[in-house]
Amino acid sequence: MVARRFGVLVVMVALAAPRLAAACGCVDWPPERQMAEADQVFVGRYVRPGPDEEGGKLRFDVLESLKGEVGHRFEIPRPPESDCERNFENKELAIVFVAKGHVPVCGGNVDIDKALPTLGDYLTLAGHAQPAPSLAVMKIALAGRLGSARKLKVYAPALAGKSLSVGSTQVSFVDGNGEDLFAASGVTSSVVSYVVLRSQHIATHLLIAPVQGKLQVVYALKRNLTTR
């Protein structure tokens, strides 16, 4: 997974949340319901409290607030242990849904590999997303993913007519004949950007955000479109 190249993340709790959701008797809610049911929603990184506070709080550094009163750091009392409550690993990146002081699995608190493909929906529902990533964001998203072509047309209607250089490749964004082209789409909120790159068989979902003031890919998920 591309994200493991970046020191800002650690391994997630793999596939735990979907199994917990089944155990809790809930089904996957659509993004609209997850947003409506939550009091606060944000993209953040879990920060494990120090030894003297262990077990007392859930603490997150917030990258992007999507709903409710959320500052740069968000804390809630740690709920009692339950199969229906989400657990987090230190430095884990997550889309967090808080409802009545809890982080319920049924409310959308799942592993980021499951949540990332719908991040664009959450950013749009938050009401402050731009319909297309900036060229600066697209340059970061495309870097290292274009092969050795000197020129490349990328199907991206929202950016049609624009171009940029990515390494030695000149990229032109177009809005026609997209079936056989490398395709790019996404949205940008106030701080984070969500970009999807698609070739014929592979989709790469990217979360791009500032790290120490510099935009970079903080998480990436590659999915094979030919398998389920």
Image (cartoon, rainbow, N blue to C red):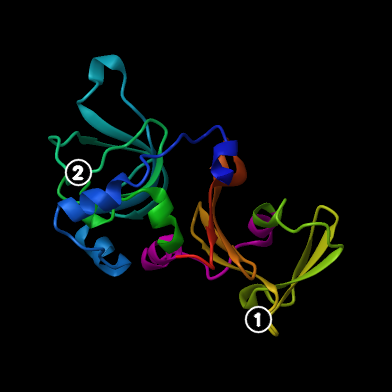
According to the picture, the residue beneath numbered tag 2 turns out to be 85
* Marks 2 and 1 in Cβ contact (< 8 Å): no
Indicate whether residue 12 is drawn in magenta: no
- Kindly identify the residue that appears in the image at 16 percent across and 43 percent down: 83
Q: Which residue is mark 1?
A: 179
Answer above or below: position of 9 versus 215: above
**Mark 2, secondary structure of its residue:** loop
User: As rendered, which of 207 and 23 lies closer to the eye?
Assistant: 23
**Among numbered discs 2 and 1, the one appearing first in the sequence:** 2
Classify residue 34 by image quadrant: bottom left
Q: x and y percent of residue 75 in the render?
A: 27, 36
Q: Residues within 10 Å of mark 2 (few under 14, many from 20)?
A: many
At a point 46% along the width and 34% down the height, the residue shown is: 10
Locate residue 134, reporting x and y percent. Answer: 63, 62
Numbered range of the magenta stretch:
119-139
User: Amino acid under label 2?
Assistant: Glu
* Visible residue check, residue 25: yes
| Residue 173 pos. (x, y %) | 72, 73
Of all residues, the one furthest to the bottom in this rendering is 176
